[in-house]
Each structure stands twice: as structure tokens, then as C-alpha cells.
Image: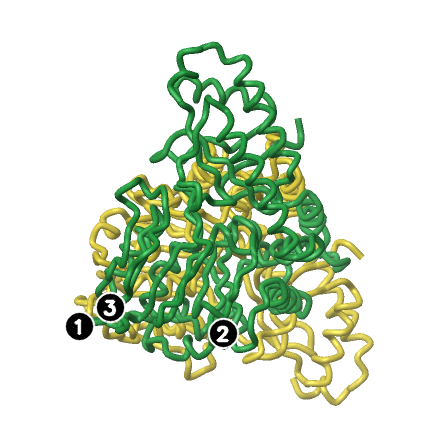
Chain colours: A green, B yellow
């Protein structure tokens, strides 16, 4: 049975070699005679892990020197509140682009701290696209984007100039493609897609922007506290950071972000081509906004949906059921998912088309 | 080399059997053909882990039915802010007992939200004791205790009746001894001592008390959100919760909290007896307030301190250097530390006394 083809949306597949090193380190890390789970976060060995992980993030994303790289807890959901808590003063306004479920969650939290202007929304067509034209009030504290919409299967490929500080939730596509960090004032990402296991959050922020944050906020919600304490104001999520380091080392070996981006483009192209070809399925996102990370598609008929889930499960394919509010399928093609797994899924779709008997469906598409 | 005697203060030793199961699950969990690091937190298998961990907490601590058991992130440091954010309204007062470094951190965060009354402090004698007599304003929103002071080596064994809601940071002694949960309105604890690896926080709270929390606070800082979503409003720290489950199963096998409490008493008694007997060392905490979890002691002379650290390291003893503000030694005797490790430390102290040559020191004690 082992190994399954894991298309799960997150926590998600990580490279087998990373799992093996992580498992070994749970028994005896670094020849220290201690498990990675029992080492002090204040030990020089673990401080070295934090430093190396920061350097890997800097190297892989070409993070400019005047940016800080921080590791936090609480996932993107905590960032939804921490961003306005730090940067949206009462009576001031922040701008948000509404591109789906998680963008809406970010908007909800921001409203606790100040005024929120939704500059554009794609809710009118079930978030199947990224709004192209919108104006941002130059008085806004910042504009907030969600670069990849995990549930709706859309992704922003073009961040146009805005004139106000840019904050971006990159939870589900960071490290999957090249980005120009200098276009952003603050980037955050829950780790559990392309960075590592659940339990840590990455923040990359321009120092000058962090310096402008509000004062008098709780220490654990204060980016400056994390910056001033090398992300170890308190006990950090030791194991999650360690596995992230292993995973980023693996990514470096893959040719870094440029190398993996080419593979990700190839994987997405292969699957979208089959969705477009196969009369039993159709994609939900508009073609030019299709995510390379989360491929959302539906069966033309409900009966085929149920049958295909079972058919695919028999081939060791897991994690392709769509999010409950969207239905259908979602195949997540994160960095560690090999092209061979996508080929297995595509072949399953081809085979399923051949054996699926309800001929009436084929005429519906 | 393997296995070291790990007296580290946290993250700390966990049972070897737990490490082995955890390592195996990083490769292939539950026969699923997936690593525990890549399973969806929404999978029935992982939902079962969360449920089982909650039930283990309930069983081991006899948590009454009208209390909720929650798993969060951010450690006790996040709770320092979350408690007043939920329960201390602006213009109202909360009471705190100042018993050391972490109590002071809790006080600092509370001051952001309302008035803080420090009912008593042991700062006058370097936090070497627990203040015995104090009055609490019956109008206080709550009284906050730190049950075990990890750095100063003191522990509260008697929680007297107070008349106001009782909140307790039990990070470093929860699961080490029997407690009567019904004496508390809210208990919190960072996991990385007796519960599991770093990266999760346990909260046990009376439902009626949670119902009184403020509204309009960020979702990830809102206890009710965690209660309403089975601690999975967003992606939880999957691996940390899973290892906590393994560790609590181990604890159950040890005779539960009563069984481990007897072993913890025995370990502490053995080490304190040697500290009191050995002319080279002396304890820092007052005898009746000595912590069973964190045994703090000093060498009579600085030279002996440096030499003993090296001497002990040669015997595979790690993690006994005292906290930087206190100096000397701190031997943490958490649940998973076997009596045999304490015997190794005591023997090292006996041997060191024999070989230590500076006779003048012996006369100083």
C-alpha cells in the first residue's frame, strides 16, 4: 500500500527523504543522544536550526536584507488578527481584496480593529476568478491579498503596483514559484503546505514597516517581539521548525524555487489538460486564474463524482475530495507531490471515462 | 552515548516508548500509508486523535463534565494575554500572585487590558517561597496563580479558597500530581513539560466561566471559538497533539496521575536529600515550597559550579545548568525522567564531593 498518492490540501505531502530524517531525529537527533522532541530550544544546536531555517528562507526567496524572517504559531488565522492589531489603528482604514473563503476570514478579523474597504470581490461568480481592476484609497493603512485561494482554486499571478503597503497571505503557494519579496511589506504563510508540518507560521516583513506597528499590544501578537528575540521570545514549535529546515534543504536540492516552479507548471498543465479533455469533468476556476497548487474540478454528474472518488481511492489516490462548500474534487499539487502521482490521477480519469457507463452524462458537457 | 539523562526544563524528556511510536508514525501512521505529518486534520483518523486526547485529559485529571478541554497554540505566553483579553474588562481589576519570572510576564500582559492588583509577592527574597497570606478584592475579575515556578524552583501545594474565579498557569506541573479541577475556573499549560512536545497549549475551563468572556475579540484568541470547533477552528498542531496522546496513554499505564505523583515524590526526595547532605551544594527554595518538578540549587563556590557541570556532562547528564538569572543548577524531574537518572545525578554529586579538592569551600557552608 505504502506510499499513497497524497493530494491533500494541507497538512500535505512532504518529501519521503524529509520524513525519514525527521523520524530518525525523533529517536536520536544529531548524534546528541537526545530526541529532537526533548532538546532545549535554547541549546546551541537548536539555535543553529532556527538560524539555518531563516537563511534558507532568505536564500530561496531572495529576501532583501532589510526584511526580517520570523517564525510564529497559530497559522494564518492568527495572522488575520495580528496584521490589523499591529497596523490598523482605530478610525483608520485598511483595504482587502475578497477572493474567497480565507480572504473573507481575514476581512472579518480586521473589522474588529478599524474600517475595512473591500476593493473588489469575485463573490459574484463563486470566486472563480481574481478581480482585475480596482482602486485603493491612498489613505489605506495597507492592501491585503490572498495570493492563492486553496478552496476556490484560483491564484494571483500579477501583483500590480498599489501605492500603499502590501500584505499578502501566501499560505498555499509560498515556495512554489518565484516572487519578488520587495513588492510586499509583509508576507505570511501557515507552514503546512510547502514549508513543513502544521504548527508554525512564516512571516517575512520589511523592517521599516514593522517599525511602524502599534505599541501596547500583547507580546505574542507583536511582530517586533519576535524580531527582537530571534523568534524565541517563548518556546517555539521546535519540531515544526526543524522539519521545515529539512524540507527547505530538500527544496534547495531541487533547484530551489525556480526549479520547483517548472515542475509545478508541468504538473498543473498535465492535470488541467485532462480535466479539459475528459467529458466527465470540468474545472471550476476561470482558465487564466487557475491555481497551480489547488486544482478544483467537478464531475458533470453527481453519480460520477461518488464513483470516481471510490475508483481513485482504489488506486491509492487520497485527499481529492473538494472542500465541503464547493464539492467535487480538489487535487493539491504541492511541491513534494511527484509528477508520477499526477500521472496516476490522470490515468485514473482516463480509465474511469472508459468504464463509466452513463452515456447520457457525456452529452451534458 | 544514547540515552542521555535529560534534566532539561522544557522541552523535556518524554518516554522512550513514546519517541519510538512517534518516529514510526512519521514514516507510516496507523497503517494508512501516510505520515502523521501529512494527514488532513479533518480526516476521521485525526479527529479521533483529538477526541482521544481530550478523553485522556478528562480521565487523568478527573475533569468534571461541565468543563471544556481545549488545545491551542502559542504556549503559556499567549495565555498571559488571552486570559485578560477574555476576562478582564477595561476599568475592571484582576488579581495576580507574583511568584516569579513567569508570574511577572502574566502581570505585564494583563496590564494592557485593565487594572492589575498584585495581592502578594515573594520578590523580597528572590522568589524563594510562596506567599502565604493575602487578601483578594471580591470585585476582582479573577485571581491568577502560577502553580509551579520553573525558574525559581517553588511550587504551590495549597490553593486556599478565594471567592473569585481562579485561573492557574500549570505549565510545569500539570499531570505531575493530583489536582481538584473543580477548584479552578480556568487552567492553562504549555505542553512541553509533562504533556508532549512543544507547539501546543492545554486549556481546561469551566463552561459557565467561558460563557462570561468578552465578545468582539479575535477568533484565535477566543476560547469559545476553540470550544465550538473541537479545537479545530483552523489547522491545529497535528503532530504535537498526536504525541501528547501517546504520552498521556503512557501516563495512564503508569497508574495515572496518582501513580506518577508517588514516583515524582520519591525522585524529588532523593535529590533534595543529597543537596542538603552534600557540603558542596545548597538549595535555593525554602524547604516547604520546594518544587518537585524543578530542583534549583547552587554550588557553595563558583569554581565548584563550573567543575561539576563538566563532571556531570561526562556522565551523560544534560540540562542541569540553572536559568541565567538564577545561575547554579536546575534539575527538572518531569514525569518521564526515570528514578535511575536521578540516582546517576546523586551519585555524581557524591563522587564529585570526594574528588573536589578545594577544602576551604567545605568550611563555608
A285 over B8 or under it: above or below: above
Tag shown at residue B91? 1
Residue A179 falls left or right of residue A166:
right
| Disc nearer the start of the sequence (3/2) | 3
Q: Is residue B254 left or right of residue B179?
A: right
Residues at badges 3 and 1 in contact (C-beta under 8 Å)?
no
Split into 4 quadrants, where in the image is the C terminus of chain A?
top left
Q: Are marks 3 and 1 on the same chain?
A: no
User: Label 2 crowding class (10 Å Cα cut-off): few <14, some 14-19, many 20+?
Assistant: some
Question: Which residue lies under the disc numbered 3?
Answer: A93
Residue A130 locus on image (x, y percent)? 37, 50
In space, the residues marked 3 and 2 are separated at their CA atoms by: 26 Å
Displayed quadrant of residue B33: top right
Same-chain status of marks 3 and 2 = yes
> Residue B230's spot in the image, x, y percent?
36, 41
The residue sitting at 70% across, 65% down in the picture is B318
Screen quadrant of the N terminus of chain A: top right
- Residue B141 lies, in percent from the top left, at 22, 64
Q: Which residue is mark 2?
A: A227
Position of residue A116 relative to residue A364, above or below, is below
Disc number lying in front (2 or 1): 2
Placement of A354 over or under A246, stated as above or below: above
| Secondary-structure class at tag 1 | loop
State whether residue B250 appears in this view.
Answer: no
Question: A183 or B309, which is in the foreground?
Answer: A183
Q: Position of residue A267 (x, y in %)?
A: 59, 40
Numbered circle sitting on residue B217: none
Q: Chain of mark 2?
A: A
Residue A274 appears in which quarter of the rendering?
top right
Residue drawn 33% across the image and 78% down it = A215
Tag 2 secondary structure: helix
Query: Of circles 3 and 2, which is in front?
Result: 3
Amino acid at each position: 500500500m505504502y506510499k499513497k498518492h497524497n493530494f491533500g490540501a494541507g497538512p500535505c505531502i512532504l518529501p519521503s527523504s524529509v520524513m525519514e530524517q525527521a523520524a530518525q531525529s525523533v529517536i536520536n537527533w544529531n548524534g546528541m543522544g537526545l530526541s529532537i522532541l526533548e532538546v532545549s530550544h535554547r541549546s546551541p544546536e537548536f539555535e543553529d536550526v532556527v538560524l539555518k531555517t531563516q537563511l534558507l528562507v532568505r536564500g530561496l526567496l531572495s529576501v532583501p536584507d532589510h526584511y526580517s524572517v520570523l517564525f510564529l504559531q497559530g497559522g494564518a488565522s492568527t495572522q488575520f488578527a495580528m496584521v490589523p492589531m499591529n497596523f490598523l489603528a482605530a478610525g483608520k482604514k485598511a483595504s482587502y481584496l475578497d477572493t474567497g473563503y480565507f480572504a473573507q476570514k481575514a476581512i472579518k478579523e480586521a473589522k474588529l480593529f478599524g474600517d475595512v474597504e473591500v476593493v473588489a470581490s469575485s463573490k459574484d461568480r463563486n470566486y472563480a476568478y481574481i478581480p482585475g481592476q480596482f482602486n485603493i484609497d491612498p489613505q489605506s493603512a495597507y492592501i491585503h491579498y490572498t495570493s492563492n485561494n486553496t478552496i476556490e482554486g484560483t491564484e494571483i499571478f500579477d501583483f500590480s503596483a498599489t501605492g500603499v503597503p502590501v500584505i499578502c497571505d501566501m499560505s498555499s503557494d509560498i515556495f512554489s514559484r518565484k516572487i519578488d519579496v520587495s513588492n510586499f511589506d509583509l508576507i505570511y504563510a501557515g507552514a503546512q503546505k510547502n514549508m513543513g508540518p502544521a504548527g508554525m507560521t512564516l512571516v517575512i516583513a520589511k523592517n521599516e514597516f514593522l517599525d511602524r506597528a502599534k505599541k501596547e499590544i500583547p507580546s505574542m501578537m507583536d511582530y517586533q517581539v519576535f524580531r527582537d528575540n530571534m523568534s524565541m521570545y517563548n518556546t517555539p514549535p521546535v519540531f515544526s521548525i526543524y522539519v521545515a529546515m529539512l524540507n527547505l534543504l530538500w527544496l534547495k536540492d531541487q533547484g530551489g524555487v525556480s526549479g520547483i516552479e517548472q515542475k509545478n507548471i508541468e504538473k498543473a498543465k498535465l492535470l488541467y489538460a485532462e480535466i479539459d479533455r475528459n467529458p466527465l469533468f470540468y474545472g471550476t476556476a476561470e482558465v487564466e486564474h487557475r491555481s497551480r497548487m489547488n486544482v478544483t474540478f467537478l464531475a458533470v454528474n453527481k453519480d460520477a463524482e461518488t464513483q470516481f472518488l471510490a475508483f481513485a481511492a482504489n488506486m491509492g489516490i487520497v485527499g481529492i475530495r473538494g472542500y465541503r462548500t464547493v464539492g467535487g474534487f480538489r487535487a493539491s499539487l504541492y511541491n513534494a507531490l511527484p509528477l508520477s502521482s499526477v500521472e496516476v490521477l490522470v490515468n485514473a480519469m482516463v480509465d474511469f471515462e472508459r468504464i463509466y457507463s452513463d452515456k447520457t452524462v457525456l452529452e451534458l458537457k
